[in-house]
């Protein structure tokens, strides 16, 4: 089962490598990982999607919590949460493409005669659906951000 | 107070002094020369020059295990740092507080593949509790403060401080002050157990009719032996210790049923399998204990006290997990039980004790093997340990290496005190015993320190014999010499049709007596059972000499009991032909 773990860690060199290293060291998989500083510049927020049953994820969150650089960990997928991915996609410009993109809530951010660059924001499923609406011949390159998320309730991941 | 201007290197030495460090184990090199010069210019801290950095970390580790203070190591960059890795991994697996301070190439050279450059922070990352790269001399005091705090609190463990050479540069000085307190927002170990969980644990304890207390290294690390003994005595519960936990409960006490696990006693493993309650304290249900986790002690309720939340329900699901320090949680539990004690009558355990004693009588270890000279004249390894126990009056600090000799020492030397038995339990590091014994001897100069080893293990750090001469360390090396890598050979006998692939050395073993003499020590070789006790006496009587007692033992001897892989804890080999299951 896919689980989404979010954490706050010290915004310091070496912190990210400790988090990522833990996953390989303990044999956990990372499906996607996204990290950036928060409004408090001393902290970075990291969201990762991993695969595992409840027991495995409990162990993962405990091991993450043990890392000295990790300040707080939550398993977002324990409850309702909002997860979004950013997709940037470079497409070969064809005749009906623009209408198709606009119908699917894609936003054209740059275009030339040959190519159209599109951004799309949505849940991972929505990104998948958007991608599958395009044909292989149209897609030149894709960049997915990986999932970022917050809990849907009033619960906060802050310190 | 006058403000002092110190260089990074002087600030390091001063910070270590502030932490109460008296002893450093190490080996100098290019990147740590400024640090070694600062060491030279002070008089508070003594340095022990080892012969290999692995020895330095094991010695610091042995020191920490024996006296409870963190062990401190200096190594240089590159090979100095990588040689420290095995020592770090050993300390990490057994949760030992060690601080390794490594020199690093100058900051501007980092990442350029410069001479003796290794990414120490990266290489050591999975085997340290935490690590620091000092980027400015001014950061050193706070880093040292944090490093010692992290190494010694919570679940202890090794910490690395990597210091680029320019950061310890003598020409740059700054206003030194040492922080009085440390606050790390992401690191707040929980000491006290949850009171509701303590109450639930107490209820289970009072209800149990077939209980066992199973404790590990955590009780020793946390100085909780007194509380453990008090609890066991007030309840009349049997106690078993892991390999790491021996000595936490007096080994000669009647309620002690021996070590458990892979080479645990018959009665301890049977008790674990048949009990209705396990009270686990500072132990982690590792694979050398549980055998097949799916078949582990299926009919028992389980209470697990551990300082590390990640140890709880990691391998075995427990009914009452309690996060907290062994000492505090045991005290809480004792108080709670005292409050409820009117309900308790320990005589309900009589049938359980009757059963345990039957097991003990049936297949318990024979601790009187010295009374029976072996038929073939060959000395048995168990007899050597029993002789060591007898002649040292059970008071020696015993370090060991890894293999059969380690298990014989654990099984046959009764450890009555915590910190008396010092071995690499988690990582299983051959070469640990001799340098660890140096650390113990330096912590307790007047104590008898014996290193029980084998001719395989001792050769992995034998160069430290030279260190022992330099610092006059009168360690007693008890070499159980069976001319083979005994534990490997045992497994090959049992599982590989006796094909001894690379577990013997032909005729290549050194003459250990001459070898010891060339290092300036005393060597004694024993081959005849009738000479064993006399030689052991002589060995231990030489209070200010290192003695290498090379005992030629029966090379056919195996360690038993031994758990059968993939089965429950009651499935044991009792000798070469006898097993407890069909």
Image: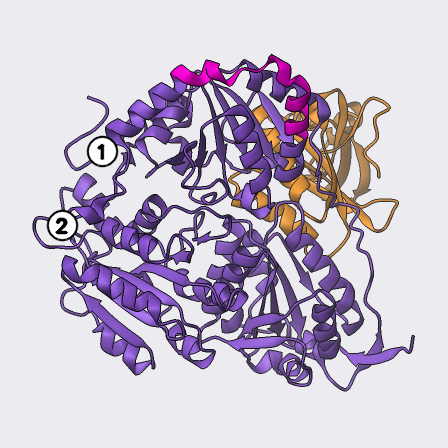
Tell if the residue under mark 1 belongs to the same chain as the one under mark 2. yes
Using the rendered image of the protein, determine whether residue B73 is visible from the camera's viewpoint: yes
Shown colour of chain B: purple
**What's the distance in space between the residues labelled 1 and 2, CA to CA?**
21 Å
Q: Quarter of the image containing the N terminus of chain B?
A: bottom right
- Decide: few, some or many residues near mark 2? Use Cα within 10 Å; few <14, some 14-19, many ≥20: some
Chain at numbered mark 1: B
Residue B459 against residue B128 in the figure, above or below = below
Residue at the (62%, 83%) spot, across then down: B33
| Lower position in the chain sequence, tag 1 or tag 2 | 2
Q: Helix or strand or loop: what does disc 2 sit on?
A: loop
Query: Residue B426, how many percent across, how many down?
Result: 45, 47
Where does label 1 land, which residue?
A: B574
Give the chain coloured orange. Answer: A
Q: Helix or strand or loop: what does disc 1 sit on?
A: loop
Query: Residue A139, how many percent across, how many down?
Result: 64, 37
Tell us which disc is closer to us: 1 or 2: 2
Residue B456's quadrant in the figure? bottom left
Residue B13 falls left or right of residue B111: right
- Decide: few, some or many residues near mark 1? Use Cα within 10 Å; few <14, some 14-19, many ≥20: some
Where does label 2 land, which residue?
A: B373
Chain at numbered mark 2: B
Residue at the (30%, 62%) spot, across then down: B478
Residue at the (76%, 24%) spot, across then down: A81
Query: Residue B458, how many percent across, how many down?
Result: 32, 64
How are the residues colored? Answer: by chain
User: What is the number of callouts on the image?
Assistant: 2
Q: Which residues are magenta?
A: B332-351
Residue occupying the far left of the picture: B376
């Amino acid at each position: 089962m896919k689980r989404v773990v979010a954490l706050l860690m010290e915004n310091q060199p070496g912190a990210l490598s400790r988090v990522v290293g833990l996953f390989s060291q303990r044999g956990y998989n990372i499906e996607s990982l996204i990290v950036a500083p928060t409004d408090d510049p001393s902290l970075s927020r990291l969201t990762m999607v991993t695969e595992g049953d409840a027991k495995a994820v409990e162990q993962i969150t405990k091991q993450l919590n043990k890392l000295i650089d990790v300040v707080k960990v939550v398993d977002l997928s324990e409850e309702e949460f909002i997860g979004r991915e950013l997709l940037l996609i470079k497409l070969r410009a064809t005749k009906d493409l623009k209408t198709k993109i606009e119908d699917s809530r894609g936003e054209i951010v740059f275009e030339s005669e040959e190519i159209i660059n599109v951004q799309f924001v949505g849940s991972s499923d929505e990104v998948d659906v958007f991608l599958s609406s395009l044909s292989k011949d149209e897609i030149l390159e894709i960049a997915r951000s990986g999932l970022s998320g917050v809990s849907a309730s009033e619960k906060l991941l802050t310190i | 107070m006058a403000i002092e201007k110190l260089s990074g290197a002087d600030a390091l030495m001063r910070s270590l002094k502030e932490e109460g460090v008296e002893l450093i184990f190490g080996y100098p090199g290019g990147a740590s020369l400024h640090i070694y010069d600062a060491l030279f210019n002070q008089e508070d801290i003594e340095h022990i020059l080892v012969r290999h950095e692995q020895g330095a970390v094991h010695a610091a580790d042995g020191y920490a295990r024996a006296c409870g203070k963190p062990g401190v190591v200096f190594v240089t960059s590159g090979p100095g740092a990588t040689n420290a890795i095995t020592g770090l991994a050993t300390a990490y697996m057994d949760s030992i507080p060690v601080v390794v301070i490594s020199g690093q190439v100058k900051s501007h050279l980092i990442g350029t593949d410069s001479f003796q450059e290794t990414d120490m922070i990266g290489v050591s990352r999975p085997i340290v509790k935490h690590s620091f790269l000092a980027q400015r001399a001014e950061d050193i005091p706070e880093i040292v403060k944090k490093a010692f705090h992290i190494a010694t609190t919570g679940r202890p463990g090794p910490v690395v401080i990597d210091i680029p050479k320019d950061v310890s540069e003598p020409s740059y000085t700054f206003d030194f002050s040492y922080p009085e307190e440390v606050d790390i927002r992401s690191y707040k170990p929980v000491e006290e157990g949850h009171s509701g969980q303590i109450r639930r644990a107490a209820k289970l304890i009072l209800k149990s009719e077939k209980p066992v207390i199973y404790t590990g290294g955590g009780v020793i690390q946390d100085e909780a032996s007194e509380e453990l003994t008090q609890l066991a005595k007030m309840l009349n519960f049997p106690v078993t210790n892991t390999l790491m936990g021996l000595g936490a409960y007096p080994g000669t006490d009647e309620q002690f049923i021996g070590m458990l696990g892979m080479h645990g006693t018959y009665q301890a493993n049977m008790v674990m399998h048949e009990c209705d309650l396990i009270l686990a304290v500072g132990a982690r249900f590792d694979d050398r204990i549980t055998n097949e986790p799916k078949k582990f002690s299926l009919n028992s309720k389980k209470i697990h006290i551990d300082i590390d939340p990640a140890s709880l329900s990691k391998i075995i699901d427990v009914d009452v997990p309690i996060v907290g320090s062994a000492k505090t949680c045991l005290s809480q539990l004792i108080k709670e039980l005292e409050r409820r004690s009117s309900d308790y009558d320990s005589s309900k355990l009589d049938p359980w004790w009757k059963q345990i004693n039957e097991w003990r009588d049936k297949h318990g270890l024979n601790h009187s093997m010295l009374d029976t000279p072996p038929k073939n004249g060959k000395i048995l390894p168990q007899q050597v340990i029993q002789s060591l126990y007898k002649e040292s009056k059970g008071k020696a600090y015993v370090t060991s290496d890894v293999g059969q000799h380690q298990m014989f020492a654990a099984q046959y030397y009764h450890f009555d005190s915590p910190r008396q038995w010092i071995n690499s339990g988690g990582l299983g590091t051959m070469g640990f015993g001799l340098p660890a014994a140096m650390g113990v001897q330096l912590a307790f100069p007047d104590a008898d320190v014996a290193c029980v080893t084998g001719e395989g293990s001792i050769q992995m750090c034998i160069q430290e014999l030279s260190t022992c001469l330099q610092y006059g360390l009168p360690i007693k090396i008890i070499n159980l010499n069976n001319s083979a890598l005994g534990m490997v050979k045992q497994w090959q006998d049992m599982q590989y049709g006796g094909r001894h692939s690379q577990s013997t050395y032909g005729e290549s073993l050194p003459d250990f007596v001459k070898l010891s003499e060339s290092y300036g020590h005393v060597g004694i070789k024993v081959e005849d059972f009738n000479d064993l006790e006399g030689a052991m006496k002589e060995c231990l009587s030489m209070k200010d000499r290192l003695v290498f007692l090379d005992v030629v033992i029966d090379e056919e001897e195996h360690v038993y009991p031994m758990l059968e892989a993939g089965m429950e804890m009651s499935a044991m080999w009792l000798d070469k032909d006898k097993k407890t299951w069909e």
